[in-house]
Amino acid sequence: MKYKKIYNTYVAMVAYTNYNSDPRVKREAEALVENGFLIDFFAIKKNDDRSYEIVNGVNLYHLNQQRYRGSSTFKYILSYIEFFIRVFFKLSFFFFKRKYKVIHINNMPDFIVFTAIIPKLFGAKLILDIHDTMPETFSTKFGSNSALFLQKILLFQERISAKFADSVISVHYPQKNEILLKHGISKEKITVISNFCDEKIFNLDKKNIVEKNIKKTRNFKIMYHGTISKRYGLDIILKGLIKVKNRIPGLLFLILGEGDYSEDLFSLIERYKLEKEVEFRNKMVPVSELPEIISDIDLGIVSFIPSKATKYMLPTKLMEYIAMEKPVLCVRNKAISYYIKENEIEFYDGDSSDSFVERLIYLYENKKRLEEIKNNERKLNDILNWTNEKKKYILLIKKLIGDS
């Protein structure tokens, strides 16, 4: 693919993430490339990542640091501080070569925005993109007697980070209206760029034709992909599969992802004797490979345990299943209910394995309902798509550089 160079304008982007398996940051970076901007992206690395590579026109710099996935609050903080230091020196050095007009910082953590203090002093505009609100996320993740104190610190760093930034991006309207505004972030600063997937990647044309022509060895294949963490309720799903595995012949639950709950999940699969029913691939899959994998399933699972941290999540995996017109069994929350009506997909209670079993059997036995969900998703795709959000994002960038 050839990319047009309209603006001789460099934009820097930063995220404590593995770039190739993070769909949101890839969408934003590639949207800028498509619109003629020059992009440097600074991210953490995996073992086999090169220090520098060009990915779909994006200059991708992997810092010499891997993501911490564990249960220690102290080690999380140390990992964030290490990332801060690495990014600070990289951004400062590159700024005097590139003269960045905009620097887009993706949380978590929010305070990474201060790595751009030198570019800001020289006129660069800063964006803080809040994927997850840290006070809510960490108060649940590290619940303890010190949780309230930790939450106050995280709220303070969020406020000063947002104040330091020139613009704040929110991933959906419930997050903006019911969290960020209540946290004291200025309404005028916030732009909502909803977390919808790129329909150029996730669409029916991406179906795996080879797999379609091979007789399936499984009668019913369900799938979860993404972060492997306790708060996503995969243990509840496994408890449900114990009850249902003899009622659904050829059942297979495919799990793709990695996280601090991976070892526990392997142990549970073994303890529950679900080795035949569960295939756990403990790795993050590049975004480009997901459509082919999703095309081969019968049902997408979007699970999490209802809590303060998950109440306002709008999972990317949900949008990816919808874009691929795969029926979804999902847990309700504020954000999902804002965009998707009760009957448009199937819901279950996230803290109940019995509820999961009931809805799973219902969908397995009711092919008409599965087709109805697919029809609903076709209509949703006309509204919940990246094309519309991309226009808002490009407009924000142009406004910040004074070209609106």
Image (tube, rainbow, N blue to C red):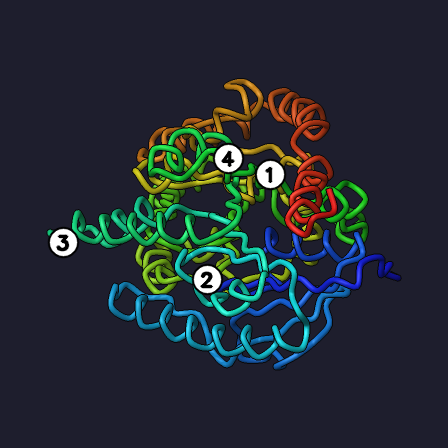
CB under 8 Å between callouts 2 and 4?
no
Please give the label number shown on residue 319: 1
| Residue 165: numbered disc | none
Q: Which residue is mark 4?
A: 188
Determine crowd level at label 4: few under 14, some 14-19, many 20+ residues with C-alpha closer than 10 A: few
**Circle 4 sits in a helix, a strand or a loop, which is it?**
helix
Position of residue 308 measured from the top left corner of the image (x, y, whole percent): 30, 38
Could one spot residue 331 in this view of the protein? yes
* Residue type of the residue flagged with mark 2: Glu
Q: x and y percent of residue 240 in the render? A: 37, 39
Label 3 residue SS:
loop
Viewer-side label of 3, 1: 3
Instruction: Give the alpha-carbon distance from disc 3 to disc 4, as whole Å.
Output: 33 Å
Q: In front: 216, or 185?
A: 185
323 shown above or below 127: above
- Picture coordinates of residue 352, whole percent (x, y): 32, 33
The alpha-carbon separation of the residues under discs 2 and 4 comes to 37 Å
Mark earlier in primary sequence (3, 4): 3
User: Quadrant of residue 273 in the image?
Assistant: bottom left
Of residues 254 and 81, the one nearer the viewer is 81
First along the sequence among labels 2 and 3:
3
The residue type indicated by label 4 comes to: Glu
Q: Amino acid at mark 1?
A: Met
